[in-house]
Image: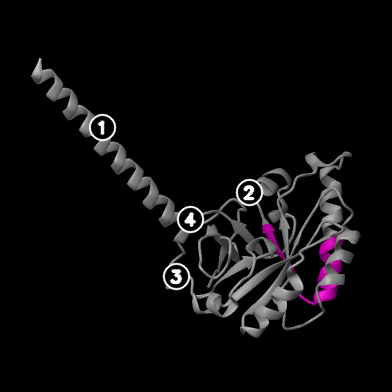
Amino acid sequence: MARRKTGGRGRWRAAAALLLLTLLAAAYGWWWLHHWRPDRGAYPAQGAEVGAENGVVDWPALKARGAGFVYLDASASAFARDPAFTRNLEDARAAKLRVGAVHRYDPCQPGDRQAANFVTLVPRDAALLPPAVALSRLAVDCPVRVTDAAVQSELTIFLNQIETHTGKPALMQLSAGFERRYAIAARFDRELWLVRDLLQPDYAGRPWALWTANAALSAEVSEHPLRWVVARR
């Protein structure tokens, strides 16, 4: 009888040890994932995408951490604007970071209205990086039907107008879902900004210029995780 109890305690101890090891491995995996950045030898040019959701950012510390550029969330759809954009633009420039602006595109809204929102907020300044348009929302979510042809047509209007304002071709920050639905990469001759944690993205069928390699990088430079971005050589 005593032997059975001893054997039972041994199994419980082994199970507890295994559980502890599993929890420790999971904790380390979580830590590693949220602190991982691509090797700087392979990708010398690295930076971040930042918006109001990041709270107060220590821009000099971000630069010291290895960021050479930053893209700031600026506008979204036809009316929304990031409340931190103007402050972030001034502070990032003061820290000697190269800066660009991002518009989050809404296929439910006309392209010209969205362009007006962007150009009203983002200054015409040759020192800014090429503008970026984030393409992730699908037209299936619109309250009224929007055809694929209309998505492409309105996006063309939007791109033409913001490129006239900035004097530079735009980057397309293209999600896998948007590309799968509309095959935009083959239809628009613009440089691509793709998104995939850890693994290089290949869903656009051609090389990317920017890659969001870690969408939740924990960093002491901001109140909330950063979106860490690298540029192709």
Looking at the picture, how far across and down is residue 39, in whole percent? 43, 68
Mark 1–mark 4 distance (CA, rounded to whole Å): 32 Å
Q: Mark 1 or mark 2, which is nearer the start of the sequence?
A: 1
Type of amino acid under label 3: Ala
Residue at horizontal 21%, vertical 33%? 13
Q: Mark 4 or mark 2, which is nearer the start of the sequence?
A: 2
Looking at the picture, how far across and down is residue 115, in whole percent? 86, 64
Residue at horizontal 45%, vertical 55%? 33
Type of amino acid under label 2: Ala
Q: Mark 3 or mark 1, which is nearer the start of the sequence?
A: 1
Residue at horizontal 60%, vertical 62%? 208
Would you say 87 lies left or right of 78 here?
left
Q: Quadrant of the N terminus?
A: top left
Instruction: Look at the picture and state if 106 lies above or below 161.
Output: above
Residue sticking out furthest to the top: 1
* Residue identified by numbered label 3: 42
| Label 1 neighbour load within 10 Å: few <14, some 14-19, many 20+ | few
* Of residues 136 and 221, the one drawn nearer to the viewer in this rendering: 221
Mark 3–mark 2 distance (CA, rounded to whole Å): 24 Å
Region rendered in magenta: 157-173
Q: Does the magenta stretch include residue 167?
A: yes
**Secondary structure beneath label 1:** helix
Would you say 170 lies left or right of 7 here?
right
**Secondary structure beneath label 4:** loop
* Residue identified by numbered label 4: 198
